[in-house]
Image (cartoon, rainbow, N blue to C red):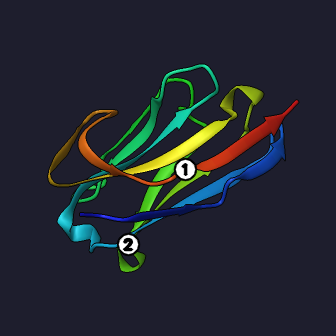
Amino acid sequence: EVQLVESGGGSVQAGGSLRLSCTASRDMYSINCMGWFRQAPGKEREGVATIYTGGGRTYYADSVKGRFTISQDNAKNTVYLQMNSLEPEDTAMYYCVAAWGGGYCAGLSVVSGYWGQGTQVTVSS
């Protein structure tokens, strides 16, 4: 099992920036991949970005390419999501997910992942 603790959400005006953090309870070297998903009210949860912790390969949703960056700090067992040029459409609950053990990522999809409780991001126009 992997426990995840997210932080960094908040309220910001359009054009602003936020950095989300997700710290895992296990060594990053034992985790296959990690990612960020988001869910806006009335919408389905969607993949935002994933990172393969072994090689650092990343995937992004088209809607955030060029604005968001996912990165990892193995020493801190932490994955970050740097969000720049935020738009009102980015308003959502953001969830961290980790694929450990039998779990894995396939692009922006995560199979058998462990989920954090989420952190709210609100962007006002």
Q: Which of 120 and 78 is in front in this view?
A: 120
Disc 1: which residue? 118
- Asked whether the viewer can see residue 89, the reply is yes
- Of the two numbered discs 2 and 1 on the same chain, state the one appearing first in sequence: 2
Residue drawn where x is 56% and y is 24% of the image = 63
Dot 2: within a 10 Å radius of its alpha carbon, few (fewer than 14), some, or many (20 or more) residues? some
**Of the residues tagged 2 and 1, which is closer to the observer?**
1
Q: In this view, does 24 lie above or below 35?
A: below
Mark seen at residue 99: none
Disc 2: which residue? 77
**In the rendered structure, which amino acid carries the disc numbered 2?**
Asn
Secondary structure of residue under mark 2: loop
User: Is residue 106 rendered to the left or right of residue 77?
Assistant: left
x, y percentage for residue 12? Answer: 82, 46
Dot 1: within a 10 Å radius of its alpha carbon, few (fewer than 14), some, or many (20 or more) residues? many
User: Is residue 54 rendered to the left or right of residue 38?
Assistant: left
**In the rendered structure, which amino acid carries the disc numbered 1?**
Gly
Residues under numbered marks 2 and 1 in contact, where contact means CB atoms less than 8 Å apart: no
